[in-house]
Image (cartoon, rainbow, N blue to C red):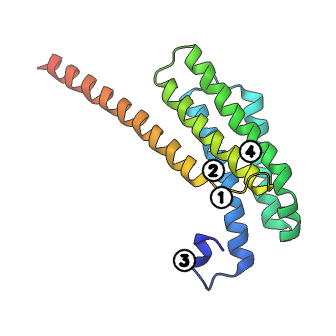
């Protein structure tokens, strides 16, 4: 059982299962948009749209097909997840090479997230017998991005203070 099923015991299994299975594609889609927003010049357009389409297709399959179908397609779908993680790492490495602001923060976050995704995939296909790590990796990614965003906010605040002082 999942945390969702424990929190809402009256939730029908078919609904909860679909909802839980759709979290990964929505996380990946959000990550793709976030990557493109941070580094638009470093994000190649065609691979972005291909990965976006693949990750948007899986939730549609989840909604319209029986659970036997979307669970059978999950292992092949993991290749799209892996490709999306590699894509995010590629964009962040490109940003580091171009010396983009805070790109090392984003790269370290992407590496943590990619490691979590790889480990979870290996657990899912029974290669490893450890607990799932993606939630911890996602927490690490968010924490690193919080540092990145707070650093940017601090710089903007300092700049605003300087501009205010110049006006007086």
Q: Position of residue 141 (x, y in %)?
A: 52, 42
4 or 1: tag closer to the N-terminus: 1
10 Å neighbourhood of mark 4: few (<14), some, or many (≥20)? Answer: many
- In whole angstroms, how far apart are the C-alphas of marks 2 and 1? 6 Å
Q: Residue furthest front?
A: 129
**Along the horizontal axis of the image, is 36 left or right of 164?**
right
- In whole angstroms, how far apart are the C-alphas of marks 4 and 2? 10 Å
Q: Residue furthest left?
A: 168
Q: Which quadrant: the C terminus?
A: top left
Is there a contact, CB below 8 Å, between mark 2 and mark 1?
yes
Q: Nearer the viewer, mark 2 or mark 3?
A: 3
Q: Residue furthest bottom?
A: 10
Q: Measured along the vertical axis of the image, is residue 3 above or below residue 138? A: below
- In whole angstroms, how far apart are the C-alphas of marks 4 and 1? 12 Å
Residue 157, can we see it? yes
Is there a contact, CB below 8 Å, between mark 3 and mark 4?
no
Kindly state the secondary structure of the residue where label 3 is placed.
helix
**Label 4, on which residue?**
81
**Label 2, on which residue?**
27
**Along the horizontal axis of the image, is 68 left or right of 83?**
right
Is there a contact, CB below 8 Å, between mark 1 and mark 3?
no
**Label 3, on which residue?**
7
State the image quarter where residue 92 is shown.
top right
**Label 1, on which residue?**
23
The residue that appears at 71% across and 75% down in the rendered structure is 15
The residue that appears at 75% across and 49% down in the rendered structure is 122
- In whole angstroms, how far apart are the C-alphas of marks 1 and 3? 16 Å
3 or 4: tag closer to the N-terminus: 3
Q: Nearer the viewer, residue 38 or 85?
A: 85
Instruction: Say the numbered circle drawn on residue 75.
Output: none
């Amino acid at each position: 059982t999942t945390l969702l099923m424990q929190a809402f015991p009256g939730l029908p299994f078919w609904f909860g299962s679909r909802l839980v299975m759709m979290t990964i594609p929505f996380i990946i889609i959000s990550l793709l948009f976030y990557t493109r927003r941070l580094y638009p010049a470093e994000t190649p357009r065609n691979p972005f749209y291909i990965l976006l389409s693949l990750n948007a297709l899986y939730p549609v399959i989840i909604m319209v097909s029986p659970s036997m179908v979307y669970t059978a397609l999950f292992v092949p779908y993991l290749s799209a997840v892996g490709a999306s993680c590699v894509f995010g790492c590629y964009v962040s490495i490109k940003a580091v090479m171009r010396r983009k602001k805070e790109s090392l923060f984003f790269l370290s976050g992407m590496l943590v997230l990619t490691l979590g995704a790889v480990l979870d995939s290996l657990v899912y296909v029974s290669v490893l017998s450890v607990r799932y790590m993606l939630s911890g990796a996602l927490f690490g990614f968010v924490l690193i991005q919080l540092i990145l965003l707070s650093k940017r906010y601090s710089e903007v605040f300092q700049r605003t203070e300087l501009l205010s002082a110049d006006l007086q």
